[in-house]
Each structure stands twice: as C-alpha cells, then as structure tokens.
Amino acid sequence: MLFSEHNFIQKNSYAGSIEVICGSMFSGKTEELIRRMKRAQFAKLPIEIFKPAMDIRYDDHTVVSHDSNSIPSTSIVHSSAILLLSAETKVVGIDEAQFFDDELPNVCVQLANKGVRVIVAGLDMDYKGLPFGPIPSLMAMAEHVTKVHAVCVQCGAPAAYSYRIDASQDRILLGEKNSYEPRCRACYFRLSDT
Ligand SMILES: [Zn+2]
C-alpha cells in the first residue's frame, strides 16, 4: 500500500498527528488513552473513540479500562468506518487497535493529513512476543510513540511481555486477568532457568 496518494494536506488546515500508546497487558494503555481524550474534551474539542466490535468484555458502547475509568465509544467492524463516522471530529481515539484490520494505518494517515489528532492504543506484542497486527506499522508512521509498562508478577521489574497462563493457542484471546500475566524479559523467556 502506497501512502503518498494521501499526503495532500489542504491549505489553511493545520497538520494533524498520530500518537501510539502501546505495551503489554495491564500496562495502563487504555488509562493513558482515556487521560489524553479527557484532556481534549476539557479543551472543548470534538472527540470520538472507536474500538473493534469484537471487544465485548464490558459495555459495548464504552471504553472501559481495568480501573473502571470509562469514556463513551463506538464499536466498529472495519477500520474504514472510522473515516465515515468522524467527519466533524478533531481528536480520534482508537482502543484495542491490535485487533483491527491492516487498513488501520492508512485510515490514521488520512485522518492525520486532514488535521485530526489520532491517538491509538494497543498491544505491541502478542503472547508469543511477536509484533501484533497493525500496531508495528502505526508505530513506524506515528509522530509520537509511548511504550507503557506493567509490573512483572514474578519479580517486580518493569514488564513488557504478556505471558499466557491459559493453554489456548488462539492468538486472539481477550484480556482477562486469569489468562495472562505481565512479565519482564528475564521471567518471560525464563532466562534464569538456563
Ligand atoms: Zn520478572
């Protein structure tokens, strides 16, 4: 996919930007997304939050983080719907972005080039420690990337990995506390055992 066709920026419109907030499970990604969106809301900017329709852990119309700090959101199936649903929006938030299709980076570029501030939150790695969905591309194209860290449950060090306790081999297993635990590199790869 070539992005140059979307690089035209209208005269008299300010340049938007892409921000990525990423990390493991329990690293506070959604909390940080909500914090930034609420600041935009205080500034009286029109905001919208989108999340993949498959995330049905909690209320389907609210982005809910683990500490129950929430903000209204719209669930969509394909990332292209974001363009249709955010015509008047100045700040677009996208949660659980790792579950979106590969068109998401292109959608974010189009929004940013129209002057929209795009804030994307998602898992940077899956439970195997591999780059997850559209997040790596978004990290490459973003102006700002924030990696947030959980705390390793084994040793207390900053944790960047989501270790799966559950035996399931499905890549997409929605995050519940009893299926994953955050681990640091040494504990994730069991480096002290070898
Ligand atoms: Zn550890």
Image: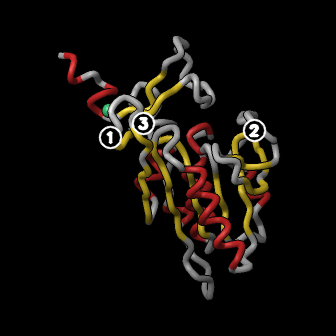
User: How many numbered marks appear?
Assistant: 3
Say which mark, if any, is on residue 53: 2
Mark in front: 2 vs 1: 1
The tag earlier along the polypeptide, 1 or 3, is: 3
The tag earlier along the polypeptide, 2 or 3, is: 2
- Mark 1: secondary structure: loop
* Residue 13 seen in the figure: yes
- Looking at the rendering, the quadrant in which ligand 1 lies is top left
In the picture provided, is 99 more to the left or to the right than 158? right
Q: Residues within 10 Å of mark 2 (few under 14, many from 20)?
A: some
x%, y% of residue 56?
76, 34
Q: Is mark 1 within 8 Å of ligand 1?
A: yes
- Mark 2: secondary structure: loop
As rendered, which of 112 and 5 lies closer to the eye?
Answer: 112
Query: What is the three-letter code of the residue carrying label 3?
Result: Pro
x%, y% of residue 7?
52, 68
Query: What is the three-letter code of the residue carrying label 1?
Result: Ala
Say which mark, if any, is on residue 157: 1
Query: What is the three-letter code of the residue carrying label 2?
Result: Ala
Q: CA distance from mark 1 to mark 3?
A: 22 Å
Mark in front: 1 vs 3: 1
Say which mark, if any, is on residue 131: 3
**What residue appears at the point 44 percent right and 26 percent down from the top-left corner?**
163
Q: CA distance from mark 2 to mark 1?
A: 34 Å
